[in-house]
Image: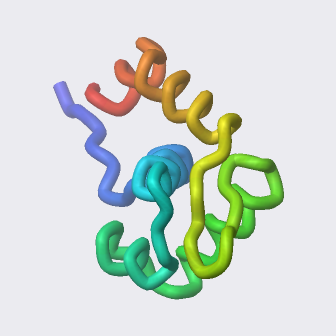
Amino acid sequence: NLVFVPRRRGFLVISVAILKAAKNGVTKARLLSSLSLSYEQATRYISFLEAHGFIEKHDSLYRTTAKGFKLIKEFEESSLIRSILHT
């Protein structure tokens, strides 16, 4: 029995990691280093999250919105997502 183990982190996993890092406010530089993202990757993810209302920029800090906190909660409580990520 072969088990598929993804080599790359998925879009949703990285998006939720960014939202978790931004709970109390975080700079883009801190995101780059803490999540091992390139500048281009971080910019792409942040742009997507901002456009969809999951994160907001205040001065130089990115902060998770109420909608972002809801996504984190749904992600952590989803048995379907957990089963896909941990198989």
Q: Depth check: 11 or 53 in front?
A: 53
Pick out the residue farthest to the left: 1
Quarter of the image with the N terminus in it: top left
| Color style of the picture | rainbow
Quadrant of residue 2 in the image? top left
Quarter of the image with the C terminus in it: top left
Q: Is residue 9 above or below residue 74?
A: below
Pick out the residue farthest to the top: 79
The residue shown at (74%, 60%) is 50
Residue 13 in the image, given as x and y percentages of width and height: 45, 46
Pick out the residue farthest to the right: 51
The residue shown at (35%, 32%) is 85
Q: Is residue 53 above or below residue 37?
A: above
Examine the rendering and report whether any part of residue 46 can be seen. Answer: yes
Q: Is residue 23 left or right of residue 7?
A: right
The residue shown at (51%, 50%) is 19
Q: Is residue 26 above or below residue 5?
A: below
Residue 28 in the image, given as x and y percentages of width and height: 51, 79
Residue 29 in the image, given as x and y percentages of width and height: 43, 84
Q: Is residue 69 left or right of residue 66?
A: left
Residue 4 in the image, given as x and y percentages of width and height: 29, 39
Q: Depth check: 36 or 53 in front?
A: 53
Q: Is residue 42 left or right of residue 55?
A: left
How many labels, in total? 0
Q: Is residue 43 left or right of residue 22?
A: right
The residue shown at (42%, 25%) is 76
Examine the rendering and report whether any part of residue 14 can be seen. Answer: no
